[in-house]
Amino acid sequence: MIRPRPRKRPCGRSARIGSWPAIFASLQKKQKRESRRGEPNGAVPAGAAASTAAAPAKAAADSDESVTNVQHAGVDEGGIVKVHGDHLVMLRRGRLFTVATGDRALRPISSADAFGPDIDPRNTWYDEMLVSEDTIAVIGYSYERGGTEVGLFQIDSAGKLAYRSTYHLRSNDYYSSRNYASRLIGNKLIFYSPLYLNPGAEDSFQSFPAVRKWRKGADKSEFRRIVSATQVYRPDRPLDSPYGVAMHTVTICDLSGGGFDCKATSVIGPPGRVFYVSPQAVYVWVTDWAGQQEAMRAQSMLYRMPLDGSAPSALRVSGSPVDQFSFLESEDDCINVLVRAEARGDGMWGAEAAAGDVALMRTGLANFSDGSETVPPSCYRRLPPPRGYTFQNRFVGDYLLYGTGSGWGSPRQADHSSLYAVRWASGDPHELALTHGTDRIEQMGSDAVIVGADGSDLHFTAVRLGESPATAGDYVRKGVSQGELRSHGFFYKPDGRNSGVLGLPISAPARPGYRHLIENSAAILFLRNNSLHFQEIGELEARPDGATDDGCRASCVDWYGNARPLFVHGRIIALLGYELVEGSLDDGRMREMRRVSYAPQSMTESRR
C-alpha cells in the first residue's frame, strides 16, 4: 500500500519553445549541484494551474439534486455517490453501481468495473466520480501505469452502465487526505495533477503533461502532449527549491457530447501545494522551505488561473494554507486565505501536520501580476494560534472559523477547547469556549455547526454568526465517534429559514479516525435544527448480512469514505457501505422503511 487546491499581467512565461530547453538545462545543473532531501513529510507534491475554457458555473444537470457537500454552489466535487435522474450512482472498491429511486423505489439496477476490460487494476486507486449529462467520469491514480487515470462510462435513463473508454494523463499522485482532485463546472471536468521535473531527462518535453487513450498493448510513445511550451508558466523569481521542482497542472476536459477534449496549463514551482477552485478561477498555493539563520521559513507563491481562459497571474506570499477550506474568493474581488507559518500544503498527509503562527491574508485580485510583486505585511492580519494539533478551518458567511481536534487519531479528552471566529473582511477574533475538540466545521444556513469529540462522546455545537458570534444549542451523542473524516460525509438539508435536518455517519466510541478506511460506519445520525437548537430524530443503522466477499480487485481501502447521508427527491437515505437504508419521519422520529444491498452477488431488498 503506497498511500498510508483592474489590469492583470500574466506570470512571466518560461514558455516559449525556443527558451524552454535552456530553462530546463539550468534546472538540471542546479538540481544536480544540490542534494535531494526527499519529499517534505513524505508528501508527493502537487498544485494547480490555469484553465483554458470553462462554462459558466451551474449545476451539472438542472434536473439533478446535489448530494455532495460542496464548498461552492455550482462547483461540483468528485465523490463516491452522485445523482443521475432517478438513479443513485455509487463508486466503491473499484466498481460502479446504480440504484433506482424513481416511483419511491430503492432497487439495484446495474454494476460495472470502474476500469476498462483490458486493464489490470492492481496498484490503481479509483477515488472519485463525477456525472455530466449521461457521462460518468471516474478519476483514479495508477502506480502500475504511472499517471492519473480517467475512465468514461455511459449511463442511460434506465440506469444501465456501459464502459466507453479510458485515458491516462502523465502525472504523479494527486492524493490529499482532505482535498478532492476533480471538479465539474457545467460539462467541464477540471482536475489537478502534479508532475516532478526530471533533471536527468535527455528530452525535457518527456516531462510535460500528456494524455493517451488506453488500448491493450498501449505504450509510452502514444502519449500526446496537452501542454505546449507556451502554456508553461513560472514566476519572475529564481527557482531554488532544495526539494526539487514540480510542474503543477490543471487539466480541463470537455465532456459534452460524450467527448474528452482536454487542454491544460502548468506552473512551475516547489512541491508543497494547496489546490482551490472558485466559480471564477483555479488557485494553486505552492510552498517551499529554505534556511535562514538556522531557522526555516516558508517561501510561497500563489497562482491564479481564471476560468475564462486568460493567462495565469501570481503573487509572492508567505506561509501556507492548510487545505482548500483555507480559501475564499469573495464577491468584493479579493482573495482571503488563512495561513500557518509551519505548513506545507495538503499533499498526501501534509494538512494533518500544519502548525505555527496563524494569519489571515487578504488582497485584491487586481494585485496579481507576474509573480514579482509581494503581498505586503499590512495584508496579513495576525490571529491567535489555537492549542492542539489537527487544524480545521472554514469560511462561513461573513466569518472565518478555526480550531483543532483529533483528526485521524484517537479522540482526545477535551474539557476545554477554543474555537476562533473572525470577520474576514475586518474585525477582531472572538474566542468561543467549547467542551470538545473541533473535528468538523460546517455551514448550517447562515450559521455554523461544530462537530468534535471529548474523548468518549460526540458533540454538535451550533454557532450563531450575527453581529457578535456566540455558541448556541449543543447536542451530545454519548458513546459514539465520528464515522467519516471527509467533508462529504456531512450534509445539511434546510427546510426553512432557520430549520433543517443534518446527517453524519457515526461509529463506535473512541474509534480512531483512520479506522474509517477499513471499517464501515455503524449508522447515520440525524438531527433536527430549529433556530440553532438540536433534537435527535433517530438513526439509520448498518446491518450487513455477515461478511461478504465482494471479490475486490482494486481500491480495496475506502480512502474517500463509505458512508453518506443522502437527501434526494424529498427522501432521506443512508449510504452505509454496500447498503442503502431509507427512512421516513413519523411524529418527528426516524423510522426505517426499507433497505437494499447492492453488494456484488447480493442485490437484495427488504422492507420493514
Image: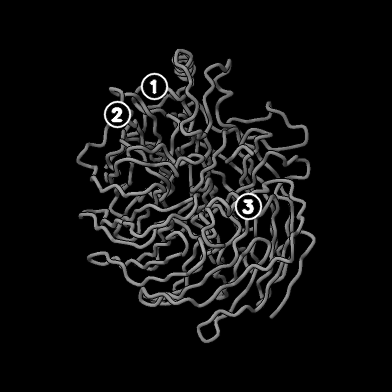
Residue marked by disc 3: 518
In the depicted view, which residue is nearer to us: 327 or 92? 92
- The answer to which quarter of the image holds residue 301 is top left
- The residue at the point 70 percent across, 63 percent down is 159
Residue marked by disc 1: 240
Marks 3,2: beta carbons within 8 A:
no
Residue marked by disc 2: 372
The answer to whether 480 appears left or right of 237 in the picture is right
- The residue at the point 54 percent across, 39 percent down is 174
Neighbourhood count class around disc 1 (C-alpha, 10 Å): few under 14, some 14–19, many 20 upward: some
Mark 3 or mark 2, which is nearer to you? 3
The answer to whether 281 appears left or right of 78 in the picture is left
The answer to whether 128 appears left or right of 537 in the picture is right
**Helix, strand or loop for disc 1:** loop
Neighbourhood count class around disc 2 (C-alpha, 10 Å): few under 14, some 14–19, many 20 upward: some
Q: Earlier in the sequence, mark 3 or mark 1?
A: 1
Q: Is residue 532 above or below residue 275?
A: below
C-alpha separation, residue under disc 3 versus residue under disc 2? 47 Å
- The answer to which quarter of the image holds residue 291 is top left
Q: Earlier in the sequence, mark 3 or mark 2?
A: 2
Amino acid type of the residue tagged 1 in the rendering: Asp
- The residue at the point 75 percent across, 39 percent down is 120
Q: Is residue 471 above or below residue 191?
A: below
